[in-house]
Image (cartoon, rainbow, N blue to C red):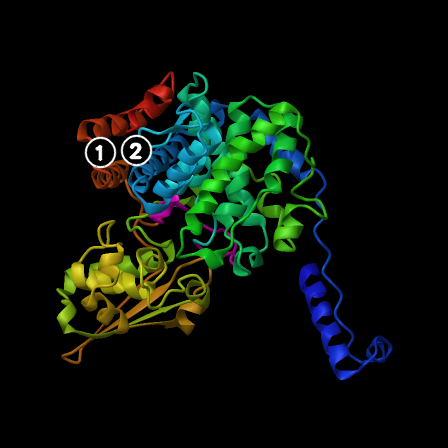
Amino acid sequence: MQRRDFLRSSASLGVVITTVGLSPATLGASENPPCAPIPFPQTPGLTKYVVEFVRNTKFTDLQADVIDLGKKSILDGLGLALAGSRAQNGKLFREYMASLGLPDRGATVMGTKTKLPPRFAAFANGLAIHVEDFDDTQLAVGKDRTYGLLVHPTAPVLPAALALTETAATSARDFLVAYHLGVEVECKIAEAISPRHYEDGFHSTGTCGVFGGTTACAKLRGFDEPQISRAFGIAASQSSGLRENFGTMMKSFHAGHAAEVGVFATDLAALGWSGAEQILEADRGFFHAFGGSYDPAAIFHKLGKPWTIANPGVSIKPYPCGSLTHPGMTEMQRLIQTEKIKAADVETVEVGTNHNMLNTLIHHRPKNNLQAKFSMEFCIAILLLEGKAGLGEFTDAVVNRPDVQQMIERVRFYTDPEAEKAGYDKMTTILKIHLKDGRVLAGRADFGKGSPANPMSYDEVAEKFHGCADFAQWPIARANRVVELVSHLEDLDDMRTLTALCGG
């Protein structure tokens, strides 16, 4: 039993004692006293180790494959920022910013003519990257850490780093080091924290993501070790994000806020603002408060050994919805194509997964596009009806079409014992398509397209980028130039060449 479980159980027990009229003394005589809490891991120097890794890592420490993987995620993030700039919550945020009367200068809000102070530009771009739930996803290593339920790594890091590169000339090599460090730190923190952090309702992109944005900004600012430590302490106190908000505008707010914190925390640290210097491992620090416990072996002496982006890797999404739907969608699309399935021929579809996937894909009868992104039923139904599931399909109008709602009713989403037994480090999805002629077509997938098991090439990511740019009604010539620049990003002397292309 974890310490927080013990305290919560003790508090509940106190209510029972009061209700039934038992005294603590009477309870103490019981043959079954409460169990003792499991000690919180003691790992002195953990924050210091992370800080030293951030301070000492150089561009030459990045392997070629790590750099190439990063460039794919960066291009993906830029495309999503363009597409997401058209989202309603992005427009609302820019309207809010305009009401504050801030000067129209600073860092670029991707896909728009708007410029904002760096912290707010980071927020706007993080919001945009995550709003369509089309952005890359960290994968878990530990068997008890649910595959695909960790950080969306690029959304908190890329916008924060890009915002700072507009304040002074920054080489792409310095930017790439900062980006990779941010992704590595946030992913290893997410991997280490107790799985209950996510299971109990925290959204790790918002909570762990603040360390990613802060790491990238601290590196770009050339912070020394005490400054990085203080920035982590400042960032940790702004860590936030609750999964109950999935299916609303607040989910992407979490990513935007994490990116903003990266800029803001390092702004304050640069001024001399203080913060705890052992914020990760302390008894009243991040891991204890947000998870109750953590696995020191998942992070201590593990940074860059290997880089998470390379092993176990990061998924780049082919569909604009929660990654847990993707194995089932990949397999459904394969079956539709190979078996020539038509929606009119389908009686029902059974979709079986492990229980953690049902705990996240919570909108079984979605009524808007944000809910649809966390609805296995919608994702299967729209593939059957349209044969595709892109940005154009995830709209309120499509979700509420009578034929879509009727097909959703035919999809049964449930916990399957076989998928449960496969382990939480997979997203095992078992399909059974019952046709009206009595046939049953079956399929199974552990991973979806875009995962390290079935990765996208740079050209495939570029195709996705062009789709996002087209959705944003962006000039094709400019889109081509971005794709070319990012493919050779390490050769760029000044990152403002790239950010200038990404404005409106």
Asked whether, in this view, residue 326 is left or right of residue 440, the answer is right
Q: Position of residue 263 (x, y in %)?
A: 52, 31
Asked whether, in this view, residue 90 is left or right of residue 221, the answer is left
Q: Give the labeled residue for mark 1.
A: 474
* 326 or 243, nearer to the observer: 243
Density class for disc 1 (Cα within 10 Å; few <14, some 14-19, many ≥20) is some
Count the marks.
Answer: 2
For image coordinates 72% across by 41% down, the residue present is: 44
The range drawn in magenta is 129-147
Q: Position of residue 231 (x, y in %)?
A: 61, 32
For image coordinates 17% across by 59% down, the residue present is: 386
Dot 1 amino acid type:
Trp
* 371 or 215, nearer to the observer: 371
Where, quadrant-wise, is the N terminus in this rendering?
A: bottom right
- The tag on residue 237 is none
Sequence order check, earlier mark of 2 and 1? 2
